[in-house]
Amino acid sequence: MKKATNPPCTTSVMASSTATPSFVPSIIDGAKLGVLAMLAVLFAVQGGFVAFFLYLRRRAKRIADIELDTEWSELQRSPRTS
């Protein structure tokens, strides 16, 4: 019985990768593209979180300013009893 020097799966992968034309993307190119796509999704989600918290910050500041203006106008309208 003859022993194989290479396992069958590496032999078939090597044979198929050398037989494919150069315009067909390889597994490595697909993995790189997948990593770039995941990074794009990651940065989009993180950007969404940042935008949401900046929105909350602006809204809280606007509401605090409105409440301060309301309180100040009420203090100016009330008669002094001293």
Image (cartoon, helix red, strand yellow):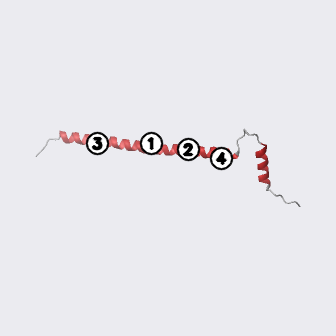
Which residue is label 3 attached to? 67
Residue at position x 50%, y 46% from top?
46
Q: Are marks 4 and 3 in contact (CB under 8 Å)?
A: no
Residue at position x 71%, y 44% from top?
26
Which residue is label 2 attached to? 41
Within 10 Å of disc 2 (Cα), the crowding (few <14, some 14-19, many 20+) is: few
Q: Nearer the viewer, mark 4 or mark 1?
A: 4
Within 10 Å of disc 1 (Cα), the crowding (few <14, some 14-19, many 20+) is: few
Mark pair 4, 1: CA separation: 30 Å
Mark pair 3, 1: CA separation: 24 Å
Residue type pointed to by label 4: Ala
Within 10 Å of disc 4 (Cα), the crowding (few <14, some 14-19, many 20+) is: few
Q: Are marks 2 and 1 in contact (CB under 8 Å)?
A: no
Along the horizontal axis of the image, is 51 left or right of 81?
Answer: right
Q: Are marks 2 and 3 in contact (CB under 8 Å)?
A: no
> Where the N terminus falls, by quadrant?
bottom right
Residue type pointed to by label 3: Glu
Residue type pointed to by label 2: Val
Which residue is label 1 attached to? 51
- The mark total stands at 4
User: Which of the two labelled residues, at mark 4 and mark 1, occupies the earlier sequence position?
Assistant: 4
Mark pair 2, 4: CA separation: 15 Å
Q: Secondary structure at mark 4?
A: helix
**Residue 39 pos. (x, y %):** 56, 46
Which residue is label 4 attached to? 31
Mark pair 4, 3: CA separation: 54 Å
Which of the 4 image quarters holds residue 19?
A: top right
